[in-house]
Image (cartoon, grey):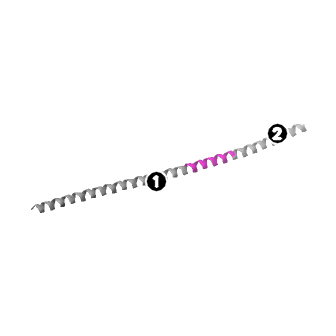
Amino acid sequence: MEEEEVEEEEEMEEEEVEEEEEMEEEEVEEEEEMEEEEVEEEEEMEEEEVEEEEEWKKKKWKKKKKKKWKKKKKKKWKKKKKKKWKKKKKKKWKKKKKN
C-alpha cells in the first residue's frame, strides 16, 4: 500500500514539474513572439519615416525647381520688356532729333 502511495505521489510530482516546465516554455515563446512583433513594428515605422522623408524631399525639390523656372521666366520677360522699352525710347529720340 505504502509503495503504491509513494509511486502515486512521485507521479503527481512529476506531472506538476512537467506542467510547470510547459508553462515556462509557453511564457518564453510568448515573450519571443512579442519581441519579434515589436521589432517588426519598429522596422515598419522606420520604413514609413524614410518614405515620408523621401516624398518630402521630392516635393521640396519640385517646388524649388518650379520656383527657379518662374524666376528665370520672369527675368527673361523683364529683359524683353526692357529691350522693347529702350527701342521705343530710341525711336522717339530719333524722331525728336529729326524735328
Q: Tell me where residue 3 appears, x and y as whole percent.
A: 12, 62
Residue carrying label 1 = 43
User: 4 or 45: nearer the eye?
Assistant: 4
Q: Amino acid at mark 1?
A: Glu
Q: Residues within 10 Å of mark 2 (few under 14, many from 20)?
A: few
Q: Secondary structure at mark 2?
A: helix
First along the sequence among labels 2 and 1: 1
Residue carrying label 2 = 89
Residue 59 located within the stretch drawn in magenta: yes
Identify the residue shown where x is 24% and y is 58%. Answer: 17
Q: Quadrant of residue 94?
A: top right
Read off the magenta span.
56-71
Q: Secondary structure at mark 1?
A: helix
Q: Quadrant of the N terminus?
A: bottom left
Identify the residue shown where x is 39% and y is 53%. Answer: 35
Identify the residue shown where x is 27% and y is 58%. Answer: 21
Q: Residues within 10 Å of mark 1 (few under 14, many from 20)?
A: few
Identify the residue shown where x is 29% and y is 55%. Answer: 24
Residue 14 located within the stretch drawn in magenta: no
- 21 with respect to 47 (left or right): left
Instruction: Give the CA distance from mark 2 to mark 1.
Output: 68 Å
User: 39 or 52: nearer the eye?
Assistant: 39
Q: Tell me where residue 27 appears, x and y as whole percent.
A: 31, 54
